[in-house]
Amino acid sequence: MITLSESAKKSLEDYLRQARAYLRGSKSVDADEVEQNIAEHIENELEGAAEPVSRDVLDAVLKKLGRPQQWVPEEELPWWWRIIFRLRSGPEDWRLAYISLALLVAGILTLPYAPIGIVLILAGFLASRAAVAEVGNAEELKAQKWLLYPSLIIVYIFVLLTLLTWPLLFIPLAGEYEHTMIESNSRFDNEIDYWIVAASVIVAGLGLWWSILAAAVLKPRKLLRVIFNPFAERLRSKWAIRLLLIGLAMLIISAGTGIVYYKGLI
Amino acid sequence: MNANFFDNWTNQLRKGVLELCILNDIRNRKMYGYEIVSRMRKTEGLIISEGAIYPILSRLKRQGLVDTFIMESPDGPARKHYKLTEQGEEMIAQMNAYWQAISGAMNSIEKG
């Protein structure tokens, strides 16, 4: 029996625990037998080494043995075991992918209890972003996409809609000032007059905002890449140009309509 | 991209070839686990992770192709040795014949 240093002993225990956990999931092998073989292998490899065997010497042997994940084909493991294993000791991108999906599902289920649901969805989003960052190149994400993208898409759609439509928040504000404006401005005879002008101003404001937004994203694409990673790569300049043209058209038509109608009220 | 393709391809090829090598090695001589690993590691590129041999041995045993027995050693503890079963003998004969056919065909394809 070879004597190991304390840190080597711990390293060996961790390794064997990991090997046992992985092998027990496979139906095609006898986990106890393999573990015994591995222990014998280590003893043989360390024969003649200076005792107590240091962690470095042991780790070199373990490195040659390889990671237990490489020993059994993943297809041999039951699906539920693959999930548990990936969560426990799988590569970071898989672990984060499962965590992300679990948080999203929990977030959706608890959405009626608003703050908890929203926090969970945001946590799922962050886990997804971390997994994408871990991989580096999103093209390398294969099956993980199905676990990671739902969290990202939900948050990105919300961000995108907020970015595009926030000027519409002025509609309730216009409603609040409706009576004050009609009473104080002699040009408005009724609510219809007021709302035609107010709507023109709001739509012109929306058009102006879209124009600014489109112009802003037309060149500095880096910011977009950071915000909408990994989908920003698919954004094309022509989309920004279209948004710019639509925004300018809305601005000109609505502002023109508002001014003409307002003047016509005299 | 090409390196990735080559890695995937060698991984797939290695899996099947490793089982063939192990069975052939045991066929010629009864051996214990560590001895098998030591012999396999001499063939460059055949094993990436030495530990992978042991689950293969266990799988072959479960499939009835190999069996184990304890053999006393003059210079150490008694060791569990592996030997081919009758079923294993038949299987390796089939596998070798298939391998010969494939490698023969491969050679002629390569030569054009």
Image (spheres, coloured by chain):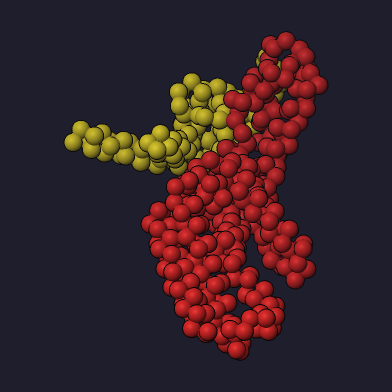
Chain colours: A red, B yellow
Q: Is residue B86 above or below residue A265?
A: above
Q: Quadrant of the N terminus of chain A?
A: top right
Q: Nearer the viewer, residue A36 or A68?
A: A68
Q: Is residue A208 visible?
A: yes
Q: Residue furthest bottom?
A: A190
Q: Residue at x 58, y 38 (%)?
A: A71
Towards the viewer: A17 or A83 = A83
Residue A98 in view, yes or no? no
Identify which residue is drawn at 61% across, 51% down. Answer: A128
Q: Name which residue lies at 56% across and 72% down.
A: A202
Viewed as shown, does residue A245 lie left or right of A195? left
Q: Where residue A206 sits in the image (x, y, percent)?
A: 53, 67
Quick check: A28 above or below B110? below
Q: Residue furthest right?
A: A6
In the picture, measured across the screen, residue B112 lies left or right of residue A35, that is left
**x, y percentage for residue A226?**
55, 46
The answer to whether A154 is drawn above or below residue B67 in the figure is below
Residue drawn 50% across and 44% down?
A222
Foreground residue, A119 or B101? Answer: A119
Task: Say which quarter of the image contains residue A253.
Answer: bottom left
Residue nearest the observer in this picture, B21 or A220: A220
The total number of labels drawn is: 0
Residue A163 falls in image quadrant: bottom right
> In the picture shown, does residue B98 fall above or below A105?
above
Q: Position of residue A35 (x, y in %)?
A: 69, 35
